[in-house]
Image (cartoon, rainbow, N blue to C red):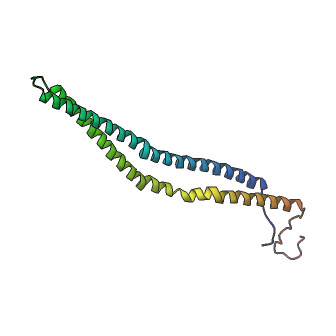
């Protein structure tokens, strides 16, 4: 080492700095999008869908109860009316209620699977988030300082020395 810097182009360092800033911005936006989608999906599963199907279950249970009461009333009546319409209504209401129960079970499984898979994958992004949020800005500052130091060095007017080619008596 002879103590001299051999930099081909300060502009190349500045161009790399600009590219790094743009890349960090795009990665940060992508990470924010992923984080937002993970939170929105979790909220959708935990609140919207659960509340929707719990409400639907209650409505369907009331319909089933009403259909069963109508069937009971038809059976108790002294008239020999056809009760098949009431029986079909009870079967339809029962199937609808079972569907709501199944939806609630599926949502519960999805929430558990979501915690096990998506949340685990999202946690794997934390080191990248750390790099983009803390390390890359430090790298940009370091590149700024490097460019500044190289420009100051270039302005000092110190001419680089030619290397000695190993022959004695050769002019410097």
Q: Is residue 87 visible?
A: no
Is 50 left or right of 126, judged from the image as shown?
Answer: left
Q: Residue at x 53, y 56 (%)?
A: 125
| Residue 99 location, quadrant | top left
Q: Nearer the viewer, residue 141 or 123?
A: 123
Q: Residue at x 75, y 53 (%)?
A: 14
Percent x, y of residue 85: 18, 26
Q: Is residue 1 visible?
A: yes
Q: Quadrant of the C terminus?
A: bottom right
Percent x, y of residue 151: 83, 58
Q: Nearer the viewer, residue 65 or 55?
A: 65
Percent x, y of residue 9: 78, 56
Q: Residue at x 83, y 70 (%)?
A: 163
Percent x, y of residue 86: 18, 28
Q: Residue at x 81, y 75 (%)?
A: 166
> Vertical placement of 130 versus 110: above or below?
below
Give the total number of marks visible in the rendering.
Answer: 0
> Vertical placement of 96 versus 12: above or below?
above
Is 8 left or right of 48, judged from the image as shown?
Answer: right
> Vertical placement of 160 versus 78: above or below?
below
Q: Quadrant of the N terminus?
A: bottom right
Q: Nearer the viewer, residue 135 or 59?
A: 59
């Amino acid at each position: 080492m002879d103590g001299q810097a051999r930099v081909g182009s300060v502009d190349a360092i500045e161009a790399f700095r600009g590219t790094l800033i743009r890349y960090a911005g795009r990665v940060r936006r992508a990470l924010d999008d992923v984080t937002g989608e993970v939170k929105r999906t979790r909220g959708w599963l935990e609140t919207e869908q659960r509340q929707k199907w719990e409400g639907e279950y209650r409505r369907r249970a009331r319909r089933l109860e009403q259909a069963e009461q109508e069937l009971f009333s038809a059976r108790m009546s002294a008239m020999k009316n056809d009760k098949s319409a009431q029986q079909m209504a009870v079967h339809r209401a029962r199937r609808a209620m079972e569907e709501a129960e199944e939806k609630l079970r599926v949502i519960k499984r999805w929430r558990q699977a979501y915690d096990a898979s998506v949340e685990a994958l999202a946690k794997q992004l934390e080191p990248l988030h750390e790099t983009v949020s803390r390390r890359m800005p430090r790298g940009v500052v370091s590149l700024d300082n490097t460019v500044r130091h190289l420009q100051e060095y270039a302005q000092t007017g110190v001419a680089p020395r030619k290397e000695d080619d190993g022959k004695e008596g050769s002019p410097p």
